[in-house]
Image (cartoon, grey):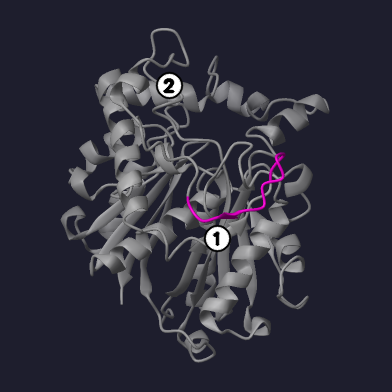
Amino acid sequence: MAENAYIVAATRTPGGKKNGSLSKWHPADIGAAVLDELVNITGVDPKDIDDVIFGCVDQVGAQSGNVARNAVLASSLPESVPGTTIDRQCGSSQQALHFATQAVMSGTQDIVIAGGVEVMSIVPIGASVTDGMNAGHGFPFNAEGIEKRYPGVFFSQFTGAELVANKWNLSREDLDQFAFESHLKAAAAANAGFFNKEILPLQGRNDNGNDSMIIADEGIRFNASVEALSGLKTVIEGGVITAGNASQITDGASAIMVCNDAGLKKLKADPRAKIKTITVVGDDPVFMLTGPIPASKLALKKADLSIDDMDIYEVNEAFAPVPLAWAIELGADKSKLNVNGGAIALGHPLGSTGTKLMTTMLHELERRNGKYALQAICEGGGTANATIIERL
C-alpha cells in the first residue's frame, strides 16, 4: 500500500521584475535561500533530507551543471544531500513536486524538497535553444521524425495562444479584461498582506546596487487599467495576444518540503496538506497550451471528486486564453480561479512557477479554511501537470 505524501512547508521568494531587484542573484544562491528557509520552518535535521529536486527550464550558463545540486552546495545543507534538476518546461517544479511525491509514497525516501529556480534576467528565456543553435546543433523541432509527423508546422507558444483564443471565441477585450482583473486581485491580495506568510524577504541585488530588503512581488501594476492594456500592440498583426495579457518575465525561486509518515516523525512541523492526486498528460503540441484541460479532468477522476468540490484552483496564466479556456471546458467557477492574481500580474519564473503557485495555493486554502484545491500548468511541447491537494 502506498504511503501518504504530505506538504509540511512551502516558501517562495518575491517575484523580481526583469532587471529588477533580484536580477543579480546567482540562481544557486537564490535556490539556496529557499532551501535554508524550509529548514528554518520545519526544524528538520538537514542530514535527514533525502533529496532535492529542482525545476529549471534554461539550464545553461549560471543555471547549468545541475543547479539543484549547486543550490544545495550554496546552502546550509550538508554535502550528503543530493540534488537533481529537471525540465518539463513551464511545469518543471510542479513535476519536481510530483517526483518528490512519488518518492515518499514509494517509501524509498522519507523527506524530499521539491522546488525550482529561474533568474531570467541572467539566463533569458530561450537561452538553451539559442545556445544550441549558435553552436550549430540546430533547432529542437528539426528532428526528421517531428517534421514528418507535423509537416510545415512551426511550434510556438504565441501561435498556440492565438489558436486557443480563436477556438474558444475569446476576444482581445476578454483577454485584456482578464489581465486587468489579475492585477486587480494581486494588488488587493498584496495590500491585505495575503502573501506575507509565503514570501521569503531577500536583499535586493541589481545594477543600481540596491541593497534594500525586497518583501513584495515587483510585477503588480497597482494602477493597471483596461484602457492601458487595450492600447498595447499585439505580438502578431491581427492577433489578440499582447505583452499585457501574457505572463511576465520574472526572477525567483520556490520550494516545498514533502514527506511521508516516517518523515513526519523526524520533523518538528505538522503536515499542512496531503497530496491527493498527481497527473501528467500529453496533448496537442501545436495548440501546445491546452494540456491543463485533460490533466485536470484526469486528476478529478482519479480523486473521485468534481470541479465543484474544489475550493480554489490555480491555472497558470502563461497567456490569458489558457485559464479562460480551461474554465469553460471544466465548467469552473471563475470566482475561484487564481483568486489572488496570477502570472500576468505576479510573474512566471519558468522553472520555479509550479511550486510558487502551489505555495500560494496552499496558503490561500488555509486562509479560507477550505478543503480541496487544484493546480494545473500548460507546458511547451503540449504537456501539462495537474495536482489536487487536501488541507489537513
Lateral position of residue 53 relative to residue 390, left or right: right
Q: Position of residue 371 (x, y in %)?
A: 24, 68
x 78%, y 75%: residue: 79
Q: Nearer the viewer, residue 289 or 241?
A: 241
x 35%, y 59%: residue: 194
Q: Position of residue 295 (x, y in %)?
A: 36, 48
Q: Residue furthest right?
A: 135
Give, as a three-letter code, the residue at label 2. Thr
Specify start and end residues of the magenta stretch as a single range.
206-216
x 48%, y 55%: residue: 356
Instruction: Determine which residue is flagged by label 2.
Output: 242
Label 1: few (<14), some (14–19) or many (≥20) C-alpha neighbours in 10 Å: some
Q: Main secondary structure of the magenta part?
A: loop
Lateral position of residue 272 relative to residue 328, left or right: right
Residue 259: give its label.
none
On screen, residue 20 above or below 301: above
Lateral position of residue 177 relative to residue 60, left or right: left
Q: Nearer the viewer, residue 240 or 230?
A: 230
